[in-house]
Image (tube, rainbow, N blue to C red):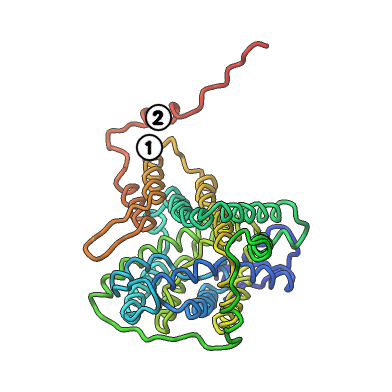
Amino acid sequence: MSKTAREGYFPRWTEKPDGVIGPEERLPWGQTMVVGLQHVFAMFGATVLVPILMGFDPNTSVFFSGIGTLLFFVIVGGRVPSYLGSSFSFVAVALAATGYAGKGPNPNIGLALGGIIAAGALYAIIGLIVMGTGYRWIERLMPPVVTGSVVAVIGLNLAPVAVKGISGSGFDTGIGLATVLATGAVAVYSPGLLRRVPILLGGVIGYLLYLVLANGMGLGPAVNFALLREAAWIGFPHFSRPVFRWDVALLFAPAALVLVAENLGHVKAVGAMTGQSLDRYLGRAFVGDGLATMLAASGGGTGVTTYAENIGVMAVTRIYSTLIFVVAAVAAIAMGMSPKFGALIGTIPGPVLGGLSVVLFGLIAATGGRIWVQNRVDFSNSRNLITAAVTLTMGAGDLVLKLGDFSVGGIGTATFGAIIIYQLLREPAGRTDALAAADSAAAEPLPARVVPG
């Protein structure tokens, strides 16, 4: 009988008040609630941005992100810490399939929803194959040098978005950098519980500073609260029906491979941060994410994926308890059913969100490096070095690969490139151990010279 079977389907979370909190541990309930809300705040900006870009209803997407996260939690047995937010991998293909002009509701949203469901179905099938055959073939296909590169690329690819958010004017840059410093100061200097919520408190400090300088002193564009006053407190999100067409389904299907890479990178990153391998849950994680994507698209939401922003929050707080994501999911569902709260979040100034993104996306990129270190990736090996170098450049440079009407963005291109390059660059048959040892020795640093005083 397996260890998981002996323990039951769900873990028995043990309470731990401080230190590193593992996936099967939990903080006291009050702290769990606060940290869960921080994860909602971390995912909100990107989860709302994706539907806006595609002409979807943001409240609907937030609502289904919460539903999808709960579904994922149940399928993985509460053992993989993850929030499922809107995936950027669907944006380009949705625009191509629907011809969306970029303003207002998407008139062809049904076609995009049908395509997203097709990608989610393929994703879930891959998960079932992994559950039946094991995850070792995925590891051979995507070893640590590849997964670390993919995780780093996610942060680097998103970096221009963060920088753009604080580059509109000198005032925006000042607010963004002040938010970055506030977040760092909370993480480093705050006592006890406050140190656990640097993203949330950094955002609040940045918001208040913006209100004082812009609304109070007129140094920048004032925050407009008109929509907040007019919004209703409670209201169902706007649901839409999917429309299925084979040509659109085939257009969306390759996005499933990007989701596999994102989820694999997430699981590997969390394993590296916690020191506990979660690889045995990869199949279930793929199935959970795939089904959550299908469920979201069936009602008008975006495709979902394990969220990079929440990796950043876990990296800085060192809290990996899966229960905090139940709190985050319930809060997201409530937010999706509250136009008033959605309008409040909509008042957060762009420079504040940009400052928080600088921190979070940087942490994601650094987590990729941590995967390399934790797995002792040998960069004196040319195969590893070239794989990482090319992947980082393609991802950071956002190389877009166009195949007819289908476009693969920088993250997808870098992901496929990392997999293909690593598999192609095998050691030549005539290469001897002596030559390999010589390469390794050549990569060793020279001994330090002792200079007489």
Number of other residues with Cα within 10 Å of mark 1, as a class: few under 14, some 14 to 19, many 20 or more:
some
Label number found at residue 299 = none
Quadrant occupied by the C terminus: top right
Q: Which residue lies furthest to the top in this view?
A: 452
Q: Is residue 133 shown left or right of residue 278?
A: left
Q: Percent x, y for residue 277? A: 54, 58
Residue at 70% across, 52% down = 185
Q: In this view of the protein, which residue sits in the foreground, 299 or 319? A: 299
Label 2 sits on a secondary structure element that is: helix
Number of other residues with Cα within 10 Å of mark 2, as a class: few under 14, some 14 to 19, many 20 or more:
some
Q: Indicate the amino acid at tag 1.
A: Ser
Q: Is residue 208 shown left or right of residue 441?
A: right
Q: Work out whether 324 lies above or below 317.
A: below
Residue at 44% across, 50% down = 149
Residue 201 found in image quarter = bottom right
Q: Work out whether 94 lies above or below 67.
A: above
Residue at 29% across, 69% down = 96
Q: Mark 1 points at which residue?
A: 382
Q: Work out whether 393 lies above or below 230.
A: above
Q: Percent x, y for residue 340? A: 59, 81
Quadrant occupied by the N terminus: bottom right
Residue 90 found in image quarter = bottom left
Q: Indicate the amino acid at tag 2.
A: Asp
Q: Are marks 1 and 2 in contact (CB under 8 Å)?
A: yes
Q: Percent x, y for residue 128? A: 39, 72
Q: Percent x, y for residue 392? A: 41, 47
Q: In this view of the protein, which residue sits in the foreground, 131 or 220? A: 220
Q: In this view of the protein, which residue sits in the foreground, 401 or 357? A: 357
Distance between mark 1 and mark 2 Cα atoms: 9 Å
Q: Mark 2 points at which residue?
A: 439
Q: Which residue lies furthest to the front in this view?
A: 218
